[in-house]
Image (spheres, coloured by chain):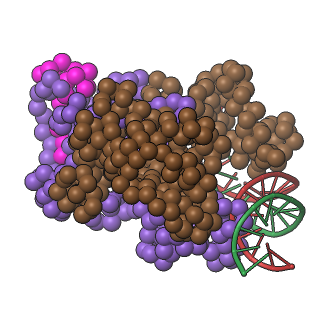
Chain colours: A purple, B brown, C green, D red
Amino acid sequence: MTARYAGIAGELREAIMRGDYDVGAQLPSEAELAVRFAASRGTVRQAVAVLAAEGLVGSRQGARRIVLGRERSQSFAELHSFAQWARSMGHRVTGRVLEQRRRAADAAEAARLALRPGDAVLRVLRLRSLEGEPVLLERTVYAGWIAPAVESLPADCESVTQALYEGVGLVFAYGEHLIDAVAAGTEDARLLSVRRGSPLLRQRRVTTTPEGRPVEWSDDRYRAGSVTFSIRNSVDANPLVRQVGDLRPSS
Amino acid sequence: MTARYAGIAGELREAIMRGDYDVGAQLPSEAELAVRFAASRGTVRQAVAVLAAEGLVGSRQGARRIVLGRERSQSFAELHSFAQWARSMGHRVTGRVLEQRRRAADAAEAARLALRPGDAVLRVLRLRSLEGEPVLLERTVYAGWIAPAVESLPADCESVTQALYEGVGLVFAYGEHLIDAVAAGTEDARLLSVRRGSPLLRQRRVTTTPEGRPVEWSDDRYRAGSVTFSIRNSVDANPLVRQVGDLRPSS
DNA sequence: TAGTGGTCTAGACCACCTA
DNA sequence: AGGTGGTCTAGACCACTAT
């Protein structure tokens, strides 16, 4: 059962992304929305709070809410798996394993996964789609100890994170993320249905157990325009730093 | 006059950071807090929602809230200005203003900068280089009240952040960042010396004063390969608790 | 089973914006 | 001056947790 406010947020989000409300345009007042959705003002406020947290709308006391943009944004404050994030945004997400095979870890993989070079790893190539459109290409290397559980998953498994939790009780924590832009290679272009050389948003990450044991190392490439990462920060602490590109050669 | 819920959030935050509640310990129930602060449950919920957004506490339906950490570093990040970061990394950084003019804020700009539509803003196009190579194109919109200070800077000012601090005592905090990949447009390509359509890493951000007053809204485009954003979800400070609730299927 | 957080309602007053 | 969002109250029911 979906919460009432989540449903309202979803409808408004769709309307914004569909273009019913232009960027810069006003949203209906809370009172109007309450009438339209037959809900109380409190529930409507919960709904628009969701949109505000997603950066879709802004507000100023006394004036109507303004549409700020129409793009999906993925917040790092709550890093969920792709499937979980997509579903929470009301998207229809599908996935498909294109390739899966074991091999020996090379030196870089071994270092990232805290293994010895030559230890077995499982390499998986997975394509994921939103609303049937391919948007994300994942090249993941799993540590050998988790490989059997991953191999037992169906090829069209929607959420690997969730399946591994339910199957073997594995909980993922997230370690370090590297984010940059790259040009689509030949394989990228073919699988994501874009032209070769077109922009992709790349996220490379290590996932660990909550105890810090590395589980996977992944190179995820998003089609440009399909998703946006969102980060909040202040002058106090620093999870986010820039690094020079040539220090980290790509895979 | 601060809001009631903000005051309650502040008291709870101080108690947590002071160590009245250990990491992993339970917070009093909403009902208890409502009695203690002589407020309604709704107001208490607003207060703890603030702490949850800061990553200080987590919650699961049916169980009491848990203290996750003592520092706001969880969901908050520090981001230095480009010049400060580059110099700290030992790079030779230069910058140049290519365009600068005042105009009226449109609806979206006004909302982002907490201005009224039509208020004056200052639009600046700035190109920045590392070791003489152009790597970053900044399209910035400054709120009108800071425009005179910005206009008084030399066109080749190395660090705007530092200059504004030394000139008018303005301290920047950072708000929300949106990161994605885009294709270089004609102007982008010419100024960054790349081919049109080639990948750029785009960062859009709002900068505010520490009090939360918006100062600028900027669209920064980095040449692919020149920089990488790195984000650490400090696993150590994040004691296991949270994920279990999140991983359960929500619908 | 009792307690707790998640959700929702139907009011209310205020500060602020628009006209 | 009237509309709007920001805040607050005092209830209510439900799903889930803990015991």
- Residue A60, image x, y percentages: 66, 61
**Is residue B72 among what the camera can see?**
yes
Pick the front one: B17 or B173: B173
Q: Is residue A110 magenta?
A: yes
Residue with the most extreme top position: A116
The percent coordinates of residue B240 (x first, y second) are 49, 29
Determine if the magenta segment contains residue A132.
Answer: no
Residue A185 horizontal side relative to residue B129, left or right: left
Please indicate whether residue A219 sits to the left or right of residue B149 in the image: left
Residue range corresponding to the magenta coloring: A109-129
The answer to which of A52 and B229 lies nearer the viewer is: B229
- Residue B179 visible in the snapshot: no
Left or right: A22 as drawn, with respect to A246: right
Placement of B129 over or under B238, stated as above or below: below
Q: How many marks?
A: 0
Residue under the image location 82 percent in, 47 percent down? B1
Q: Quadrant of residue A129?
A: bottom left
> Where is residue B232 drawn, in percent x and y?
41, 32
The residue under the point 18% across, 37% down is A250
> Does residue B18 appear left or right of residue B32 in this picture?
left
Image position of B110 with respect to B40: above or below: below
| B43, B89: nearer the viewer | B89
Quadrant of the image occupied by residue A217: top left
Work out whether residue B101 or residue B137 is closer to the camera in this orientation and state it.
B101
Give me the residue at 32% from left, 35% from top: B93
Residue B58 in picture, x, y percent from top left = 59, 37
- What's the residue at 15%, 23% (across, down)? A107
Give residue A168's quadrant in the image.
top left
